[in-house]
Image: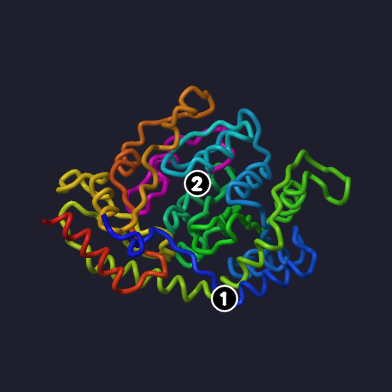
Amino acid sequence: MADVSDYIPISSVKLPAGTDDLVSSVLQSGQIAQGPMVQRLEREFAEFIGVRHVIAVSSGTAALLAALKAVGLDPGSEVITSPFTFGATLNTALATGATVRFADISEEDFAMRPDAVEDIIGSGTKVILPVHLFGQSADMTAIEAIANDTGTTIIEDAAQSLGATFHGRPVGTWGIGCFSLYATKNITSGEGGLVSTNDDRVEGFIRSFRNHGMTSNYEFECVGTNLRLTDVQAAVCLPQLPEYPRLLAVRKRNAEYLNKGLEGIQGLVIPYELKGRRHVWHQYTVLVTHHSKLSRDELAQRLREQGVGCGIYYPKLVFDHPCYRNDPRVIGIDAPVARSVSERCLSLPVHPNLSEAQLHRIVQAVSSLMTN
């Protein structure tokens, strides 16, 4: 077992200079709940993403819930999403009372395939909910065309893909965008989320919904809840924004280093930035084939023993968990590609705090285990 001090983590957070001062200014101001710092975060993120409105909320899950509520989902409405995703995608749709159907994915981008969406979309479908996984966009031109043809709304689960683009257009601008600021994300406030929209009605609803449904003190316009972000959290996040383009360049450089070192290893499929897309490399996710010397789980265990952190996202399709099996609103499918990916995917460190020596160690560890 490797020395703990020499362990390479799957993710690492180092906050930029100026964070302490900005957080301290909030603490000294006496305004630590939602206030001017949250407003500043919303304004600067709207400029970065290129939308009219950004609404800050308490988590990426809260962003999804607020977006789904904003489009008026109710029992009988259907949402189509990916089976290869975190539980929050499914949980928030079920929280509205909607029924959820699933479209199988592509191995190339880990996102649901437009043709699979077309196969299951019906008169009850109200929302198409693509998940931009690991830092790369789904095929949004095709998904947008389906939405336009069927009169459905796009809600994007972009929790892992802030800054990713599809043919130059950022994720979060194809529909209602939902981003996460969780501790392991490319930009973080510890906990937090953002909703992006160009729709004034959606913006107004979510601002009310996140504040118990109030438009002003004790004036309730809808059944809402508390999804507010604090000014302290906003202050943690804001100094990272000017640094983000540089950090994305480092993530890309790290991914290219890994690709160069791991390309051609038998039994290993490495990820690529697909043509016309900008990958922000939230995760560097390989696929271990059935012809590999080691299984995915064996490789993960051996890497950890050698001090290389790794992650398995996600070991089960989301609807395979016992709590969903008997829910009539969860319409599972065979999903052969997603099921195969869930059994073979492994994420390696790609975060911007890796040294060249650590990148070399990752490459050497994987290469040695897969070839010797």
Quadrant of the drawing holding the N terminus: bottom left
Question: Amino acid type of disc 2?
Answer: Ile
| Residue under the point 71% across and 62% down | 231
Is 186 drawn above or below residue 337 in the view shown?
below
The residue identified by callout 1 is: 242
Q: Which of 201 and 329 is in front in this view?
A: 329
Q: How many marks?
A: 2
> As displayed, is residue 180 above or below residue 297?
below
Mark 2, secondary structure of its residue = helix
- Viewport quadrant of the C terminus: bottom left
Q: In this view, does 223 lie to the left or right of 317?
A: right
Q: Which of 138 and 295 is in front in this view?
A: 295
Q: If you read the primary sequence from the N terminus, does the residue marked by circle 2 or circle 1 appear first?
A: 2
Above or below, 228 against 26 in this view is above
**Residue drawn at point x = 63 percent, y = 55 percent:** 195
Q: Residue at x 37, y 64 (%)?
A: 350
Residue 189: image location, x then y, percent = 59, 61
Residue 153 at x, y percent in the picture:
59, 46
Q: What is the image's colouring?
A: rainbow
Which element is circle 1 on?
helix
Amino acid under disc 1: Pro
Residue tagged 2 = 146
Alpha carbons under labels 2 and 1: distance apart: 36 Å
Left or right of 42 in this view: 60: left
Magenta extent? 103-128
Residue 197 in the image, given as x and y percentages of width and height: 65, 57
Q: Is residue 8 visible?
A: yes
The residue lying furthest to the right in this view is 218
Is residue 274 among what the camera can see?
no
Badge 1 local density, few (<14 within 10 Å), some, or many (20+)?
A: few
Mark in front: 2 vs 1: 1
